[in-house]
Image (tube, grey):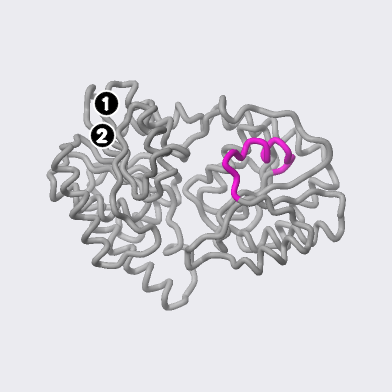
C-alpha cells in the first residue's frame, strides 16, 4: 500500500473524549503527514474542541446516542453524516465502535467516499455470550448491521486475531475484503513512563463498572483477599455506566464495605498506576485493553483473563498471570500469589515495560494503521 500526501480524513467515534484519550496521537500523526483531519463525535464540548484543534484537526459534533440504536435516531445520524461527508469530501473515513461503523458505512456510501475503514476495537455487549432473549436479539441485529457495513468497506482493521476470526466465522467479513491487525490503540510510553515499585503489594483495577469487565469477580476476589491479608491495598477506579450490563451502586458499596478502596473516575490514571504493584483486569473480552497497556508501560505486573484481546498483553509467567474469565476463585489465587511472593511483581513489571516498548508503542501502532489506510 502506498501512502498519499495531503488527504482529507474523517475519524469517527461514538464517545467524544476518546478522540483525545485514545486517538489523539493518531490525529497528531496524520496531521504531521500533511493530512486534513476532521475528528467527529457526539457531544464535543468547548474544552475538548480546543484540544482537538491544538492537535491541528477540526472537531465536528454530530448527533449520535451511544447506548441505543433506535431507527429514528439512526436515520438522523445517517443524514447528518451524509451531509457532512458531502461537504468535506473525505478521501477516507475511519470509524471505530459499532454505531459509527454501521451508520458511517451507509453515509460514506451515500456520499461517495472512496475509502471507508472500520476499526474493530472489541465486540462488546452483543457478542459476549449469554442466552437471554434480549442479548440474543441484540447479537442478531449487530451481526446483520455489521455485515451490511463491511460489504460497504474498503479495508478492515482489527486489534486481535480472535475478533477477525469470529467475524469470518459469523459471515461478517466478505472474502474479498482485505484486513489488517494492529496492537490495540497503542500506548504513549513517554507519557506513561516507567515508575519505581511502591512498597508492599497493592492491586488496582480501572474500568467502567460493567459486569463484562469483570468488576464483580474483582470485587469478590478483592474482599476475600482483604479478609486474609488486611494489610494489602486493593483499589478500584471507574464509574457507573448507563449500559444494560452495568454493575449497580449497591454492589460497589458492598465492595467498599469489604475493604476495597474506591477511587472514582480519574482524570489522570498515572498516580494510581504508580501506587499499585499489580494491575488487574478480569474482563470477559476486549479489543486490546488500553488500561492494561498503560499499566504495562508504567512497569506493572498484570493479572488478566485468558480471553480475546486480554491474552495478547501477557506472556504467562513473564509479565503477568492469566486466569479464566468469570472465575473469581482463580482470580483470588492469582492475586494471592503476589502477596505470598511480592518480589515477583517487580520482576514482572520490568518485563511489562519491555513488552510495551517493543509491541504496543503508540507510534508503531499508528504507523501500521496509517499504512493500512494508505495515509
How many numbered badges does the structure rendering display? 2
Question: Is 11 on the left or on the right of 203, as rendered?
Answer: left
> Bounds of the magenta span?
265-278
> Residue 355 at what x, y percent from top left?
59, 31
Q: Residue furthest bottom?
A: 133
> Residue 137 at what x, y percent from top left?
37, 73
Question: Is 108 on the left or on the right of 280, as rendered?
Answer: left
Query: Which residue is located at x 26 percent, y 61 percent?
Result: 74
As helix, strand or loop, the secondary structure at mark 2 comes to strand
Position above or below: 138 against 178: below
Query: Which residue is located at x 40 percent, y 49 percent?
Result: 15
> Residue 249 at what x, y percent from top left?
62, 66
Q: Is residue 151 visible?
A: yes
Which residue bears the numbered disc 1?
35
Quadrant of the image containing the N terminus:
top left
How crowded is the residue under tag 2: few (<14 C-alpha within 10 Å), some, or many (20+)? many
Which residue bears the numbered disc 2?
9
Q: Are marks 2 and 1 in contact (CB under 8 Å)?
A: yes
As helix, strand or loop, the secondary structure at mark 1 comes to loop
Query: Which residue is located at x 18 percent, y 43 percent?
Result: 85
Quadrant of the image containing the C terminus:
top left
> Residue 324 at what x, y percent from top left?
63, 58
**Residue 76 located within the stretch drawn in magenta:** no
Distance Cα–Cα, label 2 vs label 1: 7 Å
Amino acid at each position: 500500500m502506498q501512502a498519499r500526501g495531503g488527504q482529507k480524513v474523517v475519524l469517527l467515534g461514538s464517545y467524544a473524549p476518546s478522540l483525545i484519550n485514545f486517538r489523539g496521537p493518531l490525529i497528531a500523526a496524520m496531521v504531521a503527514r500533511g493530512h486534513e483531519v476532521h475528528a467527529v463525535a457526539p457531544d464535543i464540548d468547548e474544552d475538548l474542541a480546543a484540544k482537538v484543534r491544538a492537535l491541528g484537526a477540526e472537531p465536528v459534533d454530530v448527533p449520535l446516542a451511544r447506548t441505543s440504536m433506535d431507527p429514528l435516531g439512526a436515520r438522523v445520524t445517517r443524514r447528518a453524516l451524509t451531509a457532512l461527508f458531502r461537504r468535506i469530501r473525505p478521501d477516507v473515513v475511519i470509524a471505530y465502535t459499532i454505531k459509527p461503523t454501521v451508520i458511517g458505512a451507509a453515509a460514506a456510501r451515500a456520499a461517495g467516499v472512496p475509502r471507508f475503514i472500520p476499526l474493530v476495537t472489541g465486540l462488546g455487549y452483543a457478542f459476549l455470550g449469554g442466552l437471554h432473549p434480549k442479548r440474543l436479539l441484540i447479537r442478531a441485529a449487530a451481526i446483520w448491521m455489521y455485515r451490511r457495513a463491511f460489504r460497504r468497506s474498503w479495508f478492515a482493521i482489527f486489534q486481535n486475531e480472535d475478533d477477525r476470526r469470529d467475524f469470518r466465522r459469523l459471515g461478517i467479513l466478505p472474502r474479498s475484503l482485505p484486513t489488517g491487525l494492529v496492537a490495540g490503540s497503542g500506548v504513549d510510553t513517554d507519557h506513561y513512563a516507567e515508575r519505581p515499585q511502591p512498597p508492599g503489594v497493592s492491586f488496582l483495577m480501572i474500568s467502567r463498572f460493567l459486569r463484562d469487565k469483570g468488576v464483580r469477580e474483582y470485587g469478590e476476589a478483592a474482599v476475600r483477599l482483604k479478609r486474609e491479608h488486611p494489610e494489602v491495598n486493593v483499589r478500584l477506579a471507574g464509574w457507573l455506566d448507563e449500559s444494560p450490563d452495568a454493575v449497580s451502586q449497591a454492589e460497589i458499596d458492598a465492595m467498599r464495605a469489604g475493604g476495597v478502596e474506591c477511587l472514582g473516575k480519574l482524570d489522570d490514571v498515572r498516580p494510581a498506576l504508580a501506587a499499585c504493584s499489580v494491575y488487574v483486569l478480569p474482563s470477559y473480552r476486549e479489543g486490546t485493553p488500553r488500561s492494561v497497556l498503560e499499566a504495562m508501560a508504567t512497569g506493572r505486573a498484570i493479572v488478566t483473563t485468558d480471553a480475546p484481546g486480554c491474552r495478547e498483553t501477557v506472556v504467562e509467567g513473564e509479565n503477568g498471570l492469566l486466569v479464566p474469565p468469570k472465575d473469581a476463585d482463580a482470580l483470588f489465587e492469582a492475586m494471592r500469589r503476589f502477596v505470598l511472593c511480592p518480589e515477583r511483581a517487580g520482576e514482572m513489571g520490568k518485563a511489562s515495560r519491555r513488552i510495551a516498548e517493543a509491541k504496543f508503542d503508540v507510534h508503531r501502532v499508528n504507523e501500521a494503521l496509517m499504512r493500512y489506510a494508505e495515509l
